[in-house]
Image (cartoon, grey):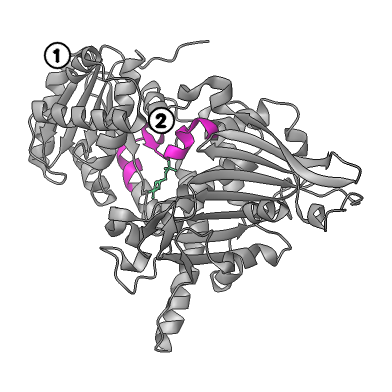
């Protein structure tokens, strides 16, 4: 096995005083350092408007790491390791839209390049709100940082949200690609860094037994659930402008659909894998905005109990306008018009304040042509054989099928075979998604990053839905009425409308199927 270690580089983190940098990026870098995967010529330069010295920045990161370790309940903090890591941390105060700040930044980078053996390799990580993506990149180019001055490489990592509809995503892409080449741009979707998401392709294409049945001849339908048990909490300001479809569906869920449905790539490399994902996204049948209700359900959570704790309703949450029509739940029936999947619906859903946090891809197989063993009511006529790829938590793969219950009668019961990551590889087997993605970006491997055409195709399909919703609101407004969304109590599996979406096709969400089976 070849050990993948990062080449030397200087990483500038814009938005370094923010939550993402503290909670995710710096802990991931520290962990890479701990595993000796970073080069001695690796340096971080945090950049943000908050005034701070290098020492204060280090202190802030140290506290964030201690908090992180406490949450993870992992090994005690290693002071020696931290001492070594903190020597590579620097901070620069500056604005996001003034030229002089960026001249000072270029100067600072030149100094660090001289002091450390970075080889002039630079990564610029945009971990800021998206409204400053354009000004930051323009200024980087203006001060000559779009290409490395001393023969190294320059890469740009762009955080989500990447646009808020098709037009804004295209505009951002046009802008970035005037200043950088596509190979320099790493659009991040942290779901792709999850071990279990990468395992979708290994499971499908690294084994001979599943792929032959992974198609319309054997699969009845597919259900993908990304459930979150938390409400929007203190992120209301951001969330209310976004909603579930922009926050989760356009990016994470479309990626899960693409990986589940794609054809085998010609090779496991960035272009081949992404070409196949693009083909899936292109095959998703665009919906007619006027028919949005036929395909998509949206809702908001109301007050309720999740895991024994009361959660206020979305409209009661601080920072949310009491008449907000932002959805916290979406269910969508997708049709994929290609040779493999024609006629196999993909039902996807995501929501906040659901009973548990879980991400599952459920492949629901066709029933046998004749049912002999339906002695226990008609249960086995409803319950499909299913294969669940559990992305998180309790990362696992579960195959469910019928077996004869021991006893004199012919009673059939659904049983399961499962593979658990922690049982097979130990508890510490799953590392954080950002670790993998940061390492890949340093290595110049963009397989797990989103290409321009992927982001635009996903936005195209989502924008049809957004257009449909806008038309509905407008029609109501003209009639002097206001839109109110269906509500679901926090701690339940979403609105009844989402059950109806499947019931119309004679299906049920898997958890209700399993519960009834008991
Ligand atoms: C983020 C969304 O992209 O993904 C959040 O903005 C969401 O709203 C999060 O909670 C979910 O990520 P994970 O890794 O916890 O499933």
For residue 115, which numbered disc appears in the image? 1
Identify the residue shown where x is 48% and y is 24%.
427
For residue 432, which numbered disc appears in the image? 2
Which of 275/7 is in front?
7
Residue 228 position in % (x across, y down): 45, 50
| Outermost residue, front side | 408
Assign a secondary structure to mark 1. helix
Residue 461 position in % (x across, y down): 52, 57
Q: Earlier in the sequence, mark 1 or mark 2?
A: 1
Q: Which residues are magenta?
A: 175-196
Assign a secondary structure to mark 2. loop
| Above or below: residue 181 compared with residue 364 | above
Q: Is residue 370 visible?
A: yes
| Above or below: residue 484 compared with residue 17 | below
Q: Is residue 7 visible?
A: no
Q: Is residue 304 magenta?
A: no
| Above or below: residue 97 compared with residue 328 | above
Ligand 1 is within 8 Å of the C-beta of the residue at disc 2: no
Which of 360/201 is in front?
360
* Total count of labels: 2
């Amino acid at each position: 096995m070849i050990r993948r270690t990062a080449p030397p580089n200087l990483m500038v983190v814009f938005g370094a005083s923010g939550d993402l940098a503290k909670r995710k990026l710096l802990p991931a870098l520290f962990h890479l350092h701990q595993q000796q995967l970073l080069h001695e010529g690796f340096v971080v330069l945090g950049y943000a408007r908050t005034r701070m010295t290098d020492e204060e920045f280090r202190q802030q990161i140290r506290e964030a790491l201690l908090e992180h370790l406490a949450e993870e309940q992992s090994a005690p903090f290693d002071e020696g390791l931290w001492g070594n890591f903190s020597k590579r941390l620097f901070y620069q105060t500056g604005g996001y839209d003034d030229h002089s700040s960026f001249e000072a930044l270029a100067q600072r980078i030149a100094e660090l390049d001289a002091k450390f053996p970075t080889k002039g390799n630079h990564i610029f990580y945009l971990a800021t709100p998206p409204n400053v993506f354009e000004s930051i990149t323009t200024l980087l180019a203006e001060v000559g940082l779009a290409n490395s001055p001393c023969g190294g490489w320059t890469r740009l990592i762009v955080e989500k949200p990447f646009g808020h509809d098709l037009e804004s995503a295209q505009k951002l892409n046009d802008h970035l690609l005037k200043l950088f080449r596509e190979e320099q741009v790493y659009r991040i979707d942290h779901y792709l860094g999850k071990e279990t998401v990468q395992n979708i392709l290994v499971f499908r294409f690294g084994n001979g037994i599943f792929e032959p049945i992974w198609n319309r001849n054997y699969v009845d339908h597919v259900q993908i659930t990304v459930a979150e048990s938390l409400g929007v909490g203190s992120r209301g300001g951001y969330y209310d402008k976004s909603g579930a479809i922009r926050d989760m569906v356009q990016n994470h869920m479309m990626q899960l659909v693409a990986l589940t449905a794609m054809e085998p790539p010609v090779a496991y490399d960035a272009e081949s894998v992404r070409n196949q994902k693009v083909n899936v996204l292109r095959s998703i049948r665009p919906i007619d905005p006027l028919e949005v209700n036929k395909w998509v359900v949206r809702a908001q959570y109301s007050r309720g109990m999740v895991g024994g704790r009361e959660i206020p309703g979305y409209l009661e949450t601080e920072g949310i306008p009491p008449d907000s029509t932002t959805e916290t739940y979406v269910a969508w029936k997708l049709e994929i018009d290609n040779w493999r999947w024609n006629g196999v619906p993909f039902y996807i859903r995501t929501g906040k304040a659901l009973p548990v946090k879980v991400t599952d891809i459920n492949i629901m197989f066709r029933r046998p042509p004749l049912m002999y063993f339906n002695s226990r009511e008609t249960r086995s006529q409803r319950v499909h054989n299913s294969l669940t790829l559990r992305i998180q938590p309790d990362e696992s793969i579960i195959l469910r099928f019928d077996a004869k219950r021991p006893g004199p009668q012919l009673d059939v019961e659904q049983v399961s075979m499962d593979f658990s990551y922690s049982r097979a590889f130990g508890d510490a087997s799953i590392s954080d998604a950002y670790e993998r993605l940061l390492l890949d970006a340093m290595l110049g491997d963009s397989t797990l990053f989103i290409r321009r055409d992927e982001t635009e195709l996903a936005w195209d399909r989502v924008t049809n839905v957004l257009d449909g919703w806008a038309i509905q609101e407008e029609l109501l407004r003209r009639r002097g009425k206001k839109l109110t969304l269906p509500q679901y109590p926090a701690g339940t599996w979403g609105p009844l409308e989402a059950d109806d979406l499947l019931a119309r096709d004679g299906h049920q969400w898997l958890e209700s199927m399993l519960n009834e089976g008991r």
